[in-house]
Image (spheres, helix red, strand yellow):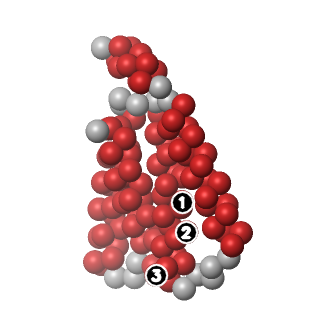
């Protein structure tokens, strides 16, 4: 459940990052601000139960990949193979971090908080 919060937070990160560049009226700025609030709230909640460094790395990595792909798909950013390769490398690192974060580490973190 906590990893789902991280993934949803990264999804909203894409919206607010794009909003910072493209917002130009009250409605788009409102959407940007709401996306920031949702994104950081979910990331903070997940960070209370999961290792913060891993949460942040997954959050930023997925948000970066989503933002790059969104700029290419929706805003006409040039598609360069080098960008795609680098995003794939970034995602491999993010997935790797999640895979090496063992349940025992998560439970140990929960035990410290109690």
Residue 109 shows in this picture: no
Rendered location of residue 12, percent (x, y): 36, 60
Q: In front here: 27 or 50?
A: 50
Give how far apart the Cα atoms at labels 3 and 2 are.
10 Å
User: Where is mark 3, residue-wise?
Assistant: 74
Rendered location of residue 86, percent (x, y): 67, 61
Tags 3 and 2 touching, CB below 8 Å: no
User: Where is mark 1, residue-wise?
Assistant: 64
Q: In front here: 54 or 82?
A: 82
- Please say if 65 is above or below 69: above
The 10 Å Cα crowd at callout 3, few under 14, some 14 to 19, many 20 or more, is: few
Q: Secondary structure at mark 3?
A: helix
The 10 Å Cα crowd at callout 2, few under 14, some 14 to 19, many 20 or more, is: some
User: Where is mark 2, residue-wise?
Assistant: 68
Of the image marks 1 and 3, the number of the one nearer the N terminus: 1
Of the image marks 3 and 2, the number of the one nearer the N terminus: 2
Residue at figure coordinates x 47%, y 48% from the top left:
59
Q: How many marks?
A: 3
Instruction: Say which mark, if any, is on residue 11.
Output: none
Q: Secondary structure at mark 2?
A: helix
């Amino acid at each position: 459940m906590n990893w789902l919060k991280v993934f949803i937070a990264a999804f909203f990160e894409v919206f607010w990052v794009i909003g910072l560049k493209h917002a130009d009226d009250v409605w788009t700025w409102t959407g940007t601000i709401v996306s920031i609030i949702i994104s950081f709230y979910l990331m903070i909640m997940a960070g209370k139960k999961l290792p913060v460094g891993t949460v942040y790395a997954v959050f930023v990595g997925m948000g970066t990949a989503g933002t790059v792909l969104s700029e290419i798909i929706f805003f006409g950013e040039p598609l360069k193979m080098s960008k795609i390769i680098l995003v794939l490398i970034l995602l491999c690192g993010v997935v790797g971090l999640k895979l090496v974060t063992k349940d025992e580490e998560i439970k140990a973190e929960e035990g410290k908080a109690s």
